[in-house]
Image (spheres, rainbow, N blue to C red):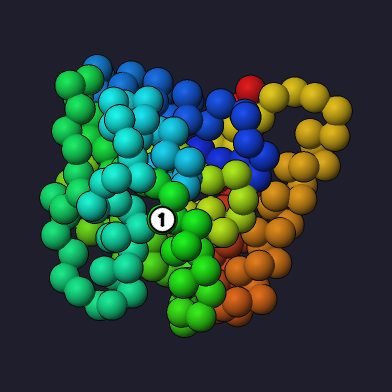
Amino acid sequence: MGKVICIANQKGGTAKTTTTVNLGIGLAKEGKKVLLIDADPQGSLSASLGIGEPDALKVTLSTILMNVVNEENIDPEEGIYHHEEGVDLLPGNIELSVMELTLANVISREMILREYIEVQRERYDYILIDCMPSLGLLLGAMLVCTIIWYRTQYMNYIILGIAEFMLVGVLAAGAFVLALVSEVRDCVGRFIIGG
């Protein structure tokens, strides 16, 4: 079963996408089967891997998540792009912003991404999720990740930001789904802080 690594920070401009691309291609060059998931509405990961207009795509992470919400069968190949560098990509785009609003009224919304990831874990050695700079879909990603790589730059108040990130993640999960609190607390032990 593959490892799932979330590259995260609730702040933009911390090289989450660059880390995701380089780590993913590096793992692929070591012979690992790697899926990169663009979970950021800006679509920067998709664009950096050659998708010219992520907003024009018919199938993206948002489409897949909606299929899960609608309890449709998950085709593990749907929406996957095979990149020449040896990684696979599930692109994201601006539709993820709307998806966040759509999920607001969905029961167990934190589990939607997990359901898709569990299907893909059988097929890949590593799944890397380039998270958006907020706690929206990131909370769902935290619950499924083997490792949470908190991408940061060393500046003033960084420790406070990390503490807030961890605390908000635990409190948000507790507020939405009390049964998941212990799982989110387990995330703390899987934290990597990378500069």
Q: At 28% across and 77% down in the image, what residue appears? A: 70
Which residue type does callout 1 highlight?
Answer: Glu
Instruction: Give the residue drawn at x 23%, y 52%.
Output: 58
Left/right placement of residue 61 relative to residue 130 reads left
Asked if one can make out residue 29 in the rendered structure from this viewpoint, the answer is: yes
Above or below — where is 66 with respect to 10? below
Q: Is residue 157 above or below residue 166?
A: above
Horizontal side of 9 relative to 52 (left or right) equals: right
For label 1, the residue is 95
Residue displayed at 40% across by 21% down = 22
Query: Residue 29 lies in what quarter of the image?
Result: top left
Can residue 186 be seen in this snapshot?
no
Query: Helix, strand, or loop for circle 1?
Result: helix
193 left or right, relative to 29: right
36 versus 164 height, above or below: above
Residue at figure coordinates x 46%, y 79% from the top left: 106
Residue 107 locus on image (x, y percent): 47, 82
Quadrant of residue 193 within the rendered picture: top right
Q: Position of residue 155 (x, y in %)?
A: 80, 24
* Number of on-image labels: 1
Q: The C terminus lies in which quarter of the figure?
A: top right
At label 1, counting other C-alpha atoms closer than 10 Å, the crowd grade (few under 14, some 14-19, many 20 or more) is some
Q: Position of residue 192 (x, y in %)?
A: 58, 35
Q: Position of residue 7 (x, y in %)?
A: 50, 38
